[in-house]
Image (tube, rainbow, N blue to C red):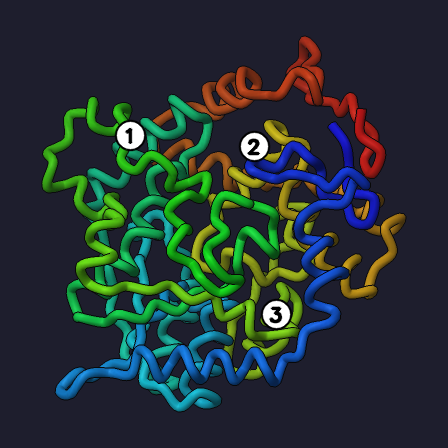
């Protein structure tokens, strides 16, 4: 395990490749590329793209944006409508009642009150729960299936409504380091299908479950052939916004009615209370991600802050050491109740999935780092 020499990105992030000099892709993009960008020129490129995808006569919407009601989607929706002058259809995949937070409901309602048309997609809850349990049992990742529905819902709805242009937020290749998602240009998102979550589509393990094929439709990402037939194009808006970041998007959305978290970083690993506002169980997955790969939610936060110069690498190390595996016991208990397992079963599963190269697990179940944050092994 090695760390980027500029930020705290470890080389254990899936699909990431460091330079020979030990720099992660996200830092290469930020320091070597985006620092010299002509943002006015990029805006003009975006205007040209929008001209190519101008709506056909009789079509109500210019584009479609996937939203949760959180900071990123609120900023995107407002910027697209108020700056670009487009009429977007907002597509929201909602969670079952046991999972969605009141905060999340308030935030999606806020977007509606801001004057947007929002279409809500809600996969069958029994199938959702069955797939969630199977995802956790097989991968110790309950979101393996639900994220497939989340990613798939937007292009599916684009096809349904005859909308060719899909606007997405950040480019995970340039801004996070998932290199397999990179397209022909910095804004081309049609290789999003190669993201770690989506690669392989509906896999054999899902097909082997006692679920009817038609019940699996919300989890099927449209094929390349379907993208070509319906002329779908995903465009990453983050590529055109020089100040796109977790914190900046949170500040922007806060002025427009966004409801933040009130529970502390020790319960969520969320330094500012602005991430995954529509549900709480992502916190479990961020903790488990830390035990699998050696980085969690705090690492993603501090990397952005280090790059923009608001935080030193040394201070980032202290925050990662203190909070990168944070997760409230209350969240764990509610999740276990939902998928019908005991918390002891949850921890047995987590302990089996711990990366033994990076961590040790003592007889009492305490997980300890073998690596030094910022240095590695």
Residue at the image point whose x is 52% and y is 38% from the top? 285
Dot 3: what SS?
A: loop
The answer to whether residue 334 is visible is yes
Q: Residues within 10 Å of mark 3 (few under 14, many from 20)?
A: some
Name which quarter of the figure residue 67 lies in.
bottom left
First in sequence: mark 2 or mark 3?
3
Residue 123 x %, y %: 22, 50
Residue 207 x %, y %: 20, 27
The answer to whether residue 103 is visible is no
Residue bearing mark 2 = 288
Residue at the image point whose x is 39% and y is 36% from the top? 144
Dot 1: what SS?
A: loop
Tag 2 and tag 3, C-beta contact below 8 Å:
no
Residue bearing mark 3 = 244
Q: Dividing the image into 4 quarters, which one contains the N terminus? A: top right
Question: In this picture, is 33 found above or below 117?
Answer: above
Question: In this picture, is 225 found above or below 92?
Answer: above
Residue at the image point whose x is 55% and y is 74% from the top? 240
Relative placement, left or right, of 337 versus 324 is left
First in sequence: mark 1 or mark 3?
1
Residue 239 x %, y %: 55, 68
Residue bearing mark 1 = 203
First in sequence: mark 2 or mark 1?
1
Q: CA–CA distance between discs 2 and 3? A: 27 Å
Mark in front: 2 vs 3: 3
């Amino acid at each position: 395990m090695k760390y980027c020499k500029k930020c705290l990105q470890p080389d254990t992030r899936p699909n990431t490749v460091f330079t020979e000099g030990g720099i992660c892709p996200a830092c290469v993009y930020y320091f070597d590329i985006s620092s010299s960008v002509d943002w006015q020129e990029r805006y003009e490129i975006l205007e040209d793209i929008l001209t190519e995808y101008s709506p056909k006569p009789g079509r109500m919407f210019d584009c479609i944006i996937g939203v949760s009601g959180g900071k990123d989607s609120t900023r995107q929706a407002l910027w697209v409508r108020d700056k670009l002058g487009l009429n977007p259809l907002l597509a929201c995949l909602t969670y079952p009642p046991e999972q969605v937070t009141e905060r999340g409901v308030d935030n999606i309602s806020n977007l509606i009150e801001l004057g947007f048309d929002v279409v809500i997609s809600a996969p069958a809850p029994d199938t959702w729960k069955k797939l969630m349990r199977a995802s956790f049992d097989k991968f110790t990742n309950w979101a393996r299936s639900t994220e497939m529905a989340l990613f798939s819902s937007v292009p599916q709805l684009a096809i349904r409504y005859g909308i060719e242009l899909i606007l997405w937020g950040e480019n995970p290749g340039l801004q996070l380091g998932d290199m397999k998602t990179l397209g022909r240009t910095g804004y081309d998102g049609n290789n999003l299908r190669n993201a770690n979550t989506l690669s392989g589509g509906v896999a054999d393990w899902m097909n082997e479950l006692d679920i009817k094929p038609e019940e699996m439709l919300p989890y099927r990402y449209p094929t390349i052939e379907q993208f070509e037939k319906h002329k779908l194009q995903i465009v990453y808006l983050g590529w055109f916004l020089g100040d796109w970041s977790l914190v900046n998007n949170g500040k922007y959305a806060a002025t427009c009615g966004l409801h933040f978290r009130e529970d502390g970083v020790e319960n969520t690993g969320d330094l500012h209370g602005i991430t995954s506002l529509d549900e709480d169980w992502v916190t479990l997955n961020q903790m488990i991600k830390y035990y699998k790969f050696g980085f969690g939610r705090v690492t993603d936060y501090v990397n952005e802050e280090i790059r923009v110069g608001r935080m030193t690498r040394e201070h980032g190390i202290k925050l990662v050491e203190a909070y990168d595996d944070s997760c409230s016991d209350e969240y764990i208990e509610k999740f276990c109740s939902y998928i019908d397992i005991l918390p002891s079963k949850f921890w047995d599963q987590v302990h089996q999935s711990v990366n033994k190269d990076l961590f040790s697990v003592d007889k009492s179940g305490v997980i300890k780092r073998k690596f030094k944050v910022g240095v590695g092994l």
